[in-house]
Structures are given as C-alpha cells and as structure tokens.
Image: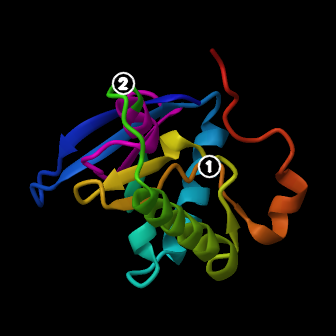
Amino acid sequence: MLGAVFLCTRKDTGEQVAVKQVDYASEEHVARTKREIELVTSKITEENGARFVRYYRAFENSQNSKIMNIEMEFCSNGDMKELCEMYEQQGQRFSQEQVIEYGYQLACAINILHNDLQVVHRDLKTENVLISNNYKNLKLGDYGLMKQLSTAISHTAHVGTLKTQ
C-alpha cells in the first residue's frame, strides 16, 4: 500500500496540489479506503481544518482499478521526517520554542481527531506530519488507516507502518 506522490497543477484553478497514487491489492481495498477518506474529510470543517491536510478528492486510475489517486493540499515545506533529517545533517537542534509550538499543534490536531471528530489516526509518524507556511504550521495527513473511535478499539492491533531498515 505504498504510494508515490506527484506535484501537480489543477487545470481549473491553477493551484498546486499533491497527488498520491496508491497501488492496492484489490478493488475492494480501494473502495474501502476511499470511503474512509471521504468519511474523515466530511467531518473536517473550516473551524477545525487548519491542523489537517485538505483532501480534495479520491478517484480510481482509469487504466487500473487497483490504483487510487488521492488529490490533496500541497504542503510546500515537506514533512517532519525530512525536517529532522535536515537539522541532523546540519548539526542543528530544534529550539525550545519550536518544540513547544510543534508539540502544541500536534496535540491540538490529535485532540480534534479524538474528541471532536471521534476518529483515531492509527499511523502517526514523522512522514505523516506535513509542514506548511514557511515551517510554521504542522498538518496531519494520510487518512488511509483512520477509524471511527467507536469501532477503532477492535481494530488497533497490528496497524500502522512497520519500521524497516
């Protein structure tokens, strides 16, 4: 379920967007993931949406029904994993202010997911924390493994992304 992400430009608005192309094992998995993404994005509003990557639409590939394209907001500063690696390569550390601000933003996003939207992310990792607005704003992305809180308890074992070397 790994995917490639492409930077694209919408023809209708000229806006830059990210399009994640994911190859699934079955058409059923494509449909289920599409429903989960639509469920979560239908709950994200202007009021609570500043902490989440906006998803515009998900659609099947016209040549292969096991491939889904997910069109989403482009976060120009990459993800937290890339930022951490850049800091490490440059011998830098995050300032205390950055750690507090980023920690606060993540805590707010998780609070909105759990308490307002009644959803569990289930794949929180640095690659799914995207950065925008000149490194000032963090946004959670990758909604593929999210579950409704009421059903998530029975689905929490063995989910997420395995760490490989």
Q: Decide if residue 162 is on the left or right side of residue 19.
A: right
Q: Which residue is mark 1?
A: 124
1 and 2 marks in contact (CB < 8 Å): no
Which is closer to the viewer, label 1 or label 2? 2
Name of the residue lying farthest toward the right: 154
Q: Decide if residue 147 is on the left or right side of residue 91.
A: right
Amino acid type at mark 1? Leu
Q: Decide if residue 25 is on the left or right side of residue 23.
A: right
In this rendering, the answer to whether 159 lies above or below 66 is below
Amino acid type at mark 2? Gln
Residue 54 % position (x, y):
38, 62
The range drawn in magenta is 60-87
Name of the residue lying farthest toward the bottom: 47
Q: Residue at x 38, y 28 (%)?
A: 63
Quarter of the rendering occupied by the N terminus: top right
Q: Which residue is mark 2?
A: 89
